[in-house]
Image (cartoon, helix red, strand yellow):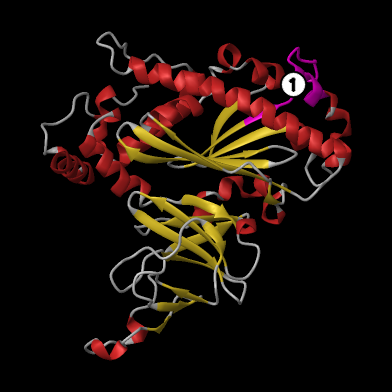
Amino acid sequence: MELLAPWTYRHPELFNLEVERIFKRHWLLACHVSDLPAPRDYFTLDAFGECALLLRGDDRRVRAFHNICRHRGAKLLDGSGNCPAMLSCPFHGWTYRLDGTLASVPASGTFADLDLTQHALAPLEMEIWMGFVFIRFAGNGAPLSEELRPVEETTAHYRTAEMAPLAGTRYAQELPYNWKTVHDIDNEGYHVPAGHPALQQLYGGNYRDEVRGGVPVSTAQLNEARGTLWSVRHYQKLLPVYDELFPHLPTPQRRAWLYIGVYPSTVLALYPECIEFYMSIPLAPGRSRMIGASYALPDARREMRAARYLNARINRMTEREDRAFVRRLHQGLHSSERPTPHLSSLEEGVFELHEQIRRELPVAGLPAAPADGTLARVDFEMRTQQRRV
């Protein structure tokens, strides 16, 4: 199983193709419906020079728009919050209804042949799956529900659409690495025994990676044997009450951690006591932004609060360890003695990600970069040749 060559992690022309042909054409997780609980609540996401606006109207319907005014393209809203009944562009005051239609224009008589009905906010493709709000900036690919159908039944047990944000869990962090390096760590469990003592004690020996109908899924049944680390040991002490805490879950899922990958860079982590998402957004060949948040069913029982607290402690340890591995992989990419990777069958998830990138960008499969300025043309020629075969 061959991986992408080191040049693909630092080449600016390939980075641009990845943004245009992969990230803008695939589904990105913007937020959860519970981030927009009330009419007029909004949430924004900026990525790749694009600005997305998620907005719940007075009719309680969630809509997605490009977050720019139709006059001269000024950004309308920042962050998240609750907006007035009309959206007004801070630049010139063009005003929009919450369904995106243009309501009024200051000094409208100074515009030649201005038809307000032709200048509504530009809609953005959106799909809500299990309570998660996904958007797609370009392309006309498969619906998200079709893409994730292989994991729909499993996910439905968690009642994720009924969940609410866990306070203090939303984060955004910039990393000095290529987005692929981040997921080269994330897409395999082979490193768990050596690299993650807490996870090894929690579910070592039971971790499995598989692909269900094209969707990467990792599952792990929790160990009954008590771990030595404080967070793991106390988390395991709660297992006897999990049948009482999680009657909505099938018995195996009451003692399992489950990870679902949504190509290209989103991961849904489903735990009995909460769920988490994280996603990488490429900023440059050597920079990425990681965003994420956690959600849970409303439940203030002491045991539930303890389970969530311990879950967060274990995951913080794991994140620190993974960041160190990402740094080491990044440094190794620049070595003149970097070996041809030899992959275990336990690392198949890494190969699958690289293979999907190669399918969409054949030029990424070359052992060396094409001459400067020719990468897009070479990729077009390779795709044309593939279609002819």
Who's the residue at 31% across and 66% down the image?
A: 73
Q: Residue tagged by mark 1?
A: 232
Who's the residue at 29% across and 49% down the image?
A: 20
Q: Is residue 137 left or right of residue 319?
A: left
Residue 78 seen by the camera:
yes
Q: Position of residue 253 (x, y in %)?
A: 74, 37
Q: Nearer the viewer, residue 284 or 191?
A: 284
Q: Is residue 198 left or right of residue 347?
A: right
Residue 187 seen by the camera:
no
Q: For the N terminus, which image quadrant?
A: top left
Q: Position of residue 24 (x, y in %)?
A: 35, 51
Q: Position of residue 180 (x, y in %)?
A: 38, 31
Magenta range:
219-236
Q: For the C terminus, which image quadrant?
A: top left
Q: Quadrant of residue 371?
A: top left
Q: Position of residue 363 (x, y in %)?
A: 22, 35
Residue 122 vertical position relative to residue 210 in the rendered view, above or below = below
Q: Residue furthest top?
A: 337
Question: Magenta span has 154?
Answer: no
Residue 311 vertical position relative to residue 294 in the rendered view, above or below = above
Q: Is residue 319 left or right of residue 13?
A: right
Q: Amino acid at mark 1?
A: Val
Who's the residue at 27% across and 8% down the image?
A: 337
Who's the residue at 49% across and 23% down the image?
A: 323
Label 1: which secondary element: helix
Question: Magenta span has 235?
Answer: yes
- The 10 Å Cα crowd at callout 1, few under 14, some 14 to 19, many 20 or more, is many
